[in-house]
Amino acid sequence: MKIIKSHFVLNREQRSGILLLVLLICVCLAVTYFRDFSQKIPENDPKMAVFQAKIDSIKALKTADTIPKIYPFNPNFISDYKGYVLGLSLKQIDKLHQFRETDQWINSTADFKKVTGVSDSLLAVISPYFKFPDWVVNAQAKKPFTGNKKKSTAQKNDINTASVEDLLLVKELNEELAIRIVNYRKRLGGFLEDNQLFDVYGLPSAVVFKIKDEFTVQTRPEITPINVNEANASDLSTISFITFDIAREIINYRELHEGINDLDELLKIEGINAYKLERIKLYLSSSQK
């Protein structure tokens, strides 16, 4: 009992030391409680701005991870959960399901808006992810063009009286080609048919079709066909596609066969093909006395 008691019996110096220690601990606790030891950084400090930017980027990444990712989907098969994730209201989802229960299909963004009544802002966000079947996409791509109807012959302008300025109304035609058309028309004395436009040098076929949509031969020039059985080489060579050498060959063939009864016989002449013959026939005749 004396041994145990000796451990709790303190002399005056020991009691004073313990009291001093307790006071020192209390003072330290009071100082740490009432004083802020954290280092304050000025708000305009560049280091603070960089540090804050890093914190913001980390927060943004965490926020992005919490947002559900949207993958391409067919809007005909939106479940309740999928609709909730996309931002659709329960009423809009119900309208979609009721529409599908009638065995009808949504085949476009416009159809989806009409059926669900979704707002334009939400539609702009989710519509890029709509994925319709290939047969729907292909069917929409093959829809016939319902633009301007082709003009009738009476509605078209006369190619034989059109000026360069008139021809330039065709967007695909430039001034150089318009001048060539007018000059070629003067050389012919006027176009006898629309297809003679294909003979204008440097004029693409696609542009010819555009011209033919707006212009046609309304007034044919009066010409006297040249008799292939009577004309000399000089007269024959004035016709487009007939050179002087070809004219000589025609005369030789005519003399050898005692005349030409059918202009199709000219296909036997070297240098004349079916395309050229169609143009040549416009200015020749084969009548014999």
Image: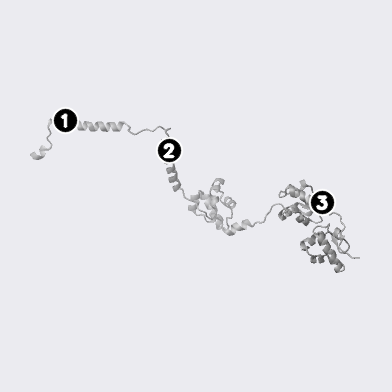
Above or below, comparing residue 58 to residue 239 in the picture = above
Give the residue number, with chain letter if any, for mark 3.
186
Q: Nearer the viewer, residue 109 or 211?
A: 211
- The percent position of residue 173, horizontal first and vertical second, equals 72, 49
**In this view, which residue lies farthest toward the right?**
289
The amino acid marked with disc number 2 is Val
Give the residue number, with chain letter if any, for mark 1.
16
Q: Quadrant of the N terminus?
A: top left
Give the residue number, with chain letter if any, for mark 2.
50
Q: Using the numbered discs, state the Cα–Cα distance from disc 3 to disc 2 in whole angstroms.
A: 78 Å
Left or right of 96 in this view: 264:
right
- The percent position of residue 67, horizontal first and vertical second, equals 46, 48
Q: Nearer the viewer, residue 84 or 209?
A: 209
Left or right of 44 in this view: 271:
right
Residue 218 visible in the displayed image:
no
The amino acid marked with disc number 1 is Ser
The amino acid marked with disc number 3 is Lys
Q: Quadrant of the C terminus?
A: bottom right
Task: Give the class, few, some or many, for how many residues have Cα within 10 Å of label 3's Cα (few <14, many ≥20).
Answer: few
Task: Give the class, few, some or many, for how many residues have Cα within 10 Å of label 1's Cα (few <14, many ≥20).
Answer: few
Sequence-first tag of 3 and 1: 1
**In this view, which residue lies farthest toward the bottom?**
257
